[in-house]
Image: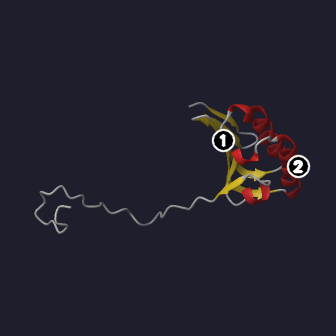
Amino acid sequence: MEKYQNKALGLTHHFSHDNLHIAVDEQFDHPQADALMEILRGNQARCKRIFVDVRKVAHSRPSAVAAFKSSLRAQVTEPGRLFFKGMLGFDLGINGNRVLIVKKAAAAAPKEKKHVCKGNCSHCTCGHR
């Protein structure tokens, strides 16, 4: 899997299973909006779905959000194929886009190992079902 990065703009993108995955880091300003729109415009015809991860964006400029939405309305042919990950997706998306809210994993609690009965354990309480 090849990953493309533009560190100056804080954008990365890669292709996986005919889908395009784009990540935006820390800020969403006019340069990021223009670069994101350019990636979408250049790749929407050859991807089934496009996922834009905006969970790491800490600062977004309202004028950049409005400009991006305007470009999105004019240039995205099938808005149902565009998914945003994160709360900022509600601001960036247009009618037909989807927003995915990903739950944070529980960091403190370690996972317990589950007992899988194979019918030969001495302390079995499940009756080997």
Q: Which residue is mark 2?
A: 70
Say what amino acid the circle numbered 2 marks.
Ser
Horizontal and vertical percent for residue 30? Answer: 85, 47
Tell which of 73 and 14 is nearer to you: 73
Indicate whether 20 appears above or below 28. above
Horizontal and vertical percent for residue 55? Answer: 66, 55
Q: Secondary structure at mark 2?
A: helix
Indicate whether 42 appears above or below 62. above
- Mark 1 or 2, closer to the camera: 1
Tell which of 128 and 10 is nearer to you: 128
Horizontal and vertical percent for residue 17? Answer: 57, 35
Inter-mark Cα distance, 1 to 2: 20 Å
What residue appears at the point 85 percent right and 47 percent down from the top-left corner? 73
Quarter of the figure that contains the C terminus: bottom left
Q: Which residue is mark 1?
A: 49
What residue appears at the point 80 percent right and 53 percent down from the top-left corner? 94
Q: Residue furthest front?
A: 129
> Can residue 22 be seen by looking at this rendering?
no
- The picture quadrant where one finds residue 101 is bottom right
Indicate whether 59 appears above or below 31. below
Q: Secondary structure at mark 1?
A: strand
Say what amino acid the circle numbered 1 marks.
Arg
Which sits earlier in the primary sequence, circle 1 or circle 2?
A: 1
